[in-house]
Image: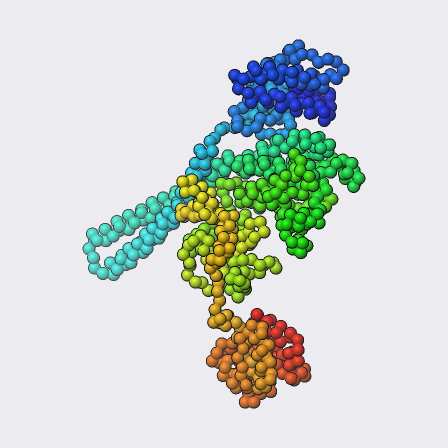
Amino acid sequence: MEDCFVAAQNKTITLDSNQVDVLLQAVDLLQGISLVSNADLPQWLNNNKVAFEQTRASVATILNPESAPLPREEKGISLSSVSSSVPVPVSSEPKTLSEIKPESNPDSALVVVNQSPPPTQVMVQRSELADPSSSASEQVAVQDRVVRVSAENLNRIMGLAGESLIEANWLQPHADSMMSLKWRLVELSRTLEHLQDALDRGAYHQDGKEYLEEARHREQECLDFLSDRLNELELYAQRTANLSDRLYREVITSHMRPFADGVQSFPPMIRNLARKLNKQVNLDIVGKATSVDRDILKKLEAPLTHILRNAVDHGIELPEERAAVGKPTVGTIRLEAFHRGGMLAITIADDGKGIDPEQLRQKVINKNLTTAEMAAQLSISELMEFLFLPGFSTAKQVTEISGRGVGLDIAKSMAQEVGGTVRAVSQKGLGTSFHFQLPLTLSVVRTLLVEISGRPYAIPLARIGHIITVERSDISDVENRQYFTMNQKNIGLIAAHQILELSEPPPQSGALSVVVVSDRDDAYGLVVDKFLGEHDLVVRPLDPRLGKVPDISATSLLSDGSPVLIVDVSDMVRSMDAILNAGRLTKVGVVTAEEIADKRKKVLVVDDSITVREMERKLLENRGYQVEIAVNGMEGWSAVRTNHYDLVISDIDMPRMNGIELVRQIKSHPRLHSMPVIIMSYRDREEDRIQGLEAGADYYLTKTSFHDNTLIDAVVDLVGR
């Protein structure tokens, strides 16, 4: 095998797909040795003797197809000599082979073989090698040495790293207190100066003056000393904070691995599966160096395997089918990992036949997941969500590869378990893609801090859809359930304190603070006391002796050292469903009739015609305004001076005081001059309109405005709805 790799590297031979299969089978055979104990090894070798001979013969044929292969012993390299010269690094990671360029003399080179570029290398060294310390490839291997760390020990280190950040934050308040002491000494200095002035103005003994001078001298020494210590303390605080940050980042980095570590088995899997199905598939892996949390990388293996197998089985078409529609005969699956917006993004995309939305819609109906009427109204993105349901499959028949209805629900569950999301996008004839958005690490989580019943709680940002404030008047009540409308979708409201079984907070006026969370297709508005801002928190698991705490996933420490609980959104959504199904919902943001009346805009209508007054009053009240009336200008002038109004609408021709005079009185008054005024009159001459506007009216409308929305538009423009 080594000779084959060297020959291929030197381009003296070209490996075809069948020859690569032989070499991969040989790799599997050699790897089988590592799985056998020393006691069972002789028996295992005896049982596999024929397989070794056949494989060695096949490998030798690759080098010299026309002649019989020579035994490895005649070439000076036996199986035992090769095996004994394999230095295996101590690592729990999978052993893979990495390719490097040979030295000028191939026979004295350190030869390393590659399937995919890995971080950990297994080196096969020839017995004729010179001093290995001079080998560049061995230096590379030394740089990537792996040290085993137990998960428990690593978790303790991560906990200490988080606590060191908390301890470092203690120094800054201490420095602030020292600064406060310094200013107190400054005040003491001023007091001593005043005392000295007082003594200078009166009679005193010479000794008293000397003592005072000595006190001032000592006070100055204290100030100088304190100033020096304060500077040193500030420098220490900076160094400690920097050290803690470096320690924290280094520990986090030690828990990360390159994405390549989790995808090494995918290329041979895709290759074998494609050959079995008589398809031609190229797997393109992008972002192999992207750092991924070890735990997330381990959890990704099963969902990525299912998605890739599905892509090969019923995503990529047969070569003749692809050629018939103008596609390259070789299908492409692209697996990409990258960091974006503080999250880990993973995309699996193929250029296959995609998913027919109408066939998917019919499949949903056939499985009785929804009615035909509702299915017809579902958007493409809503249809794609059905793919993640347990037992749902678009395959026409069940095979050993796919069609059993498992896989995508595992992907959805895994994403939600780590606090991420996954969505599917497909275009008929162009391919399908799956997009994972996962946290960079399970050790640190970006959260929104909220206050619930006077206590802080943390909600992972990855599980939050929207953060909004909802006016109480926008809340609707149907069948004892409350909801508000957002993006043409009704979002049910439920109080966070009821879910967590906390005491009810004091009633608050104004808009409600709402966090919109969702689980699959269910979205809820979680009503909290207030928002406290975004924070990165070091996740600390709960003591296992507590068992599963309802609605809580973990805990952490805030910057001041106080503990905070991290909410389990999926568990909380289930608790919401239980509360709603049991009919135990506590209503939030209930607005009384008095509060509604107090919040409505108040409009004063001044007109001597009862018909016009009533028409304006009904028109405005139907739009939610609170309306009062006055029958002439004098009564209107008296009303605006004694009551508060947001707007005045006045006629011109009225007894005792006409509308022009009323407008001038309002605009010249020091308290009322900013009050908006609309003149409504039958006069439609241009000079009348100019006269009204010159008097100070904001709008001049004719009474024909009743027949359209001109009046309402003017009112909304001046005072809003």
Query: In the drawing, does residue 504 fall left or right of residue 369?
Result: left
Which image quadrant for residue 284?
top right
Q: Residue furthest top?
A: 74
Query: Who is closer to the viewer here, 219 or 527?
Result: 527
Which residue is depicted at the point 78% across and 36% down? 320
Q: Position of residue 617 (x, y in %)?
A: 57, 79
- Judge whether 267 appears above or below 510 on screen: above
Query: In the drawing, does residue 388 fall left or right of residue 514?
Result: right
Query: Who is closer to the viewer here, 69 or 214?
Result: 69
- Judge whether 597 appears above or below 289 on screen: below
Which residue is depicted at the point 70% across and 47% down? 359
- Judge whether 118 appears above or below 671 on screen: above
- Judge whether 64 appears above or below 664 on screen: above
Q: Position of residue 227 (x, y in %)?
A: 36, 46
Query: Who is closer to the viewer here, 318 or 470?
Result: 318
The quadrant of the image that shows the N terminus is top right
Which image quadrant for residue 679?
bottom right
The reply to whether residue 331 is visible in this rendering is: yes
Q: Position of residue 635 (x, y in %)?
A: 51, 85
The reply to whether residue 350 is visible in this rendering is: no
Which residue is depicted at the point 63% across and 13% down? 77
Number of callouts in the render?
0
